Amino acid sequence: MVELLSRQAGVAARVLLVMTLLLGVGYPLAVWAVAHLPGLSASAEGSVVTGPDGTSAGSSLIGIDPVAPDGAPDPWFHTRPSATASGVLGPGDPSTSGASNRSGFNPDLLDAVEQRRAAIAAREGVDPAAVPPDAVTASASGVDPDISPAYARLQVARVARVTGLSPDEVRALVAAHTDGRSLGVLGEPGVNVTELNLALAAALR
């Protein structure tokens, strides 16, 4: 009986050692090696983007709305609104991700949409009917870095006026940071606001 238990304990110890080496060491190292293949390493490290001074400035996967203080000039492109924001436009809290879970018929949501439409129209100096849908609806995550090309174009005139860049220069920055549909057919074109604002900051240096 003792001999049997000793033999079983030995087998169990060997299996534990092999599985520890295989799954606790070998598998993580294999995943790490694959993640650091050329073309994959940037995404594996969080898609970190750098500012004009070369320091880390955030992630291209996380949108942070650079809302200017009241009365201050507003030279930046803005993301979609966030459901975590205390006001209708933001800024939201990037440490908290989530949607409001309100239906499209919820009166509070409809009221927020109309308030956002009016505020954005006033900020950009356009008719409320010209404000695109993604500008007034929060994303599911609340930290979506992408906006539609239509919303980016709407902001070009203000950004050019405040920064002193020409509208053509600002439009060129928008075009350079506009991504097409995935695989050419999936989704819609988008403009990465995080990367666009960093390029704008570099252009202003």
Image (cartoon, rainbow, N blue to C red):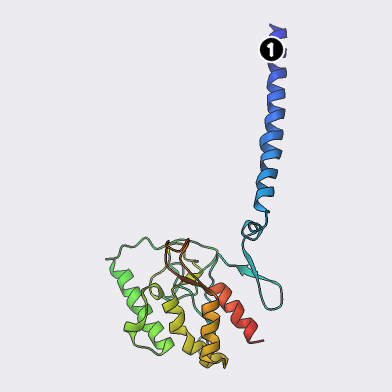
Q: Residue 198 placed where, x, y %?
A: 61, 77
Q: Which image quarter is the C terminus in?
A: bottom right
In this orientation, which residue lies closer to the viewer: 159 or 166? 166
In this orientation, which residue lies closer to the viewer: 114 or 53? 53
- Could you tell me if residue 72 is visible in this image? no
Taking the spot 49% from the left edge, 78% from the top edge, the residue there is 78
Instruction: Identify whether 78 is placed above or below 165.
Output: above
Instruction: Label 1, secondary structure: give it.
Output: helix
Quarter of the image for residue 113 reads bottom left
In this orientation, which residue lies closer to the viewer: 70 or 15? 15
Taking the spot 71% from the left edge, 72% from the top edge, the residue there is 55
Instruction: Identify whether 200 is placed above or below 43.
Output: below
In this orientation, which residue lies closer to the viewer: 94 or 126? 126
Q: Residue 192 placed where, x, y %?
A: 52, 72
- Could you tell me if residue 125 is visible in this image? yes
Can you identify the residue that label 1 sits on? 5
Q: Using residue 74 as the reference point, say whether residue 17 is left or right of it.
A: right
Quarter of the image for residue 22 reads top right
Q: Using residue 110 as the reference point, say whether residue 145 is left or right of it.
A: right
Q: Residue 109 placed where, x, y %?
A: 33, 69
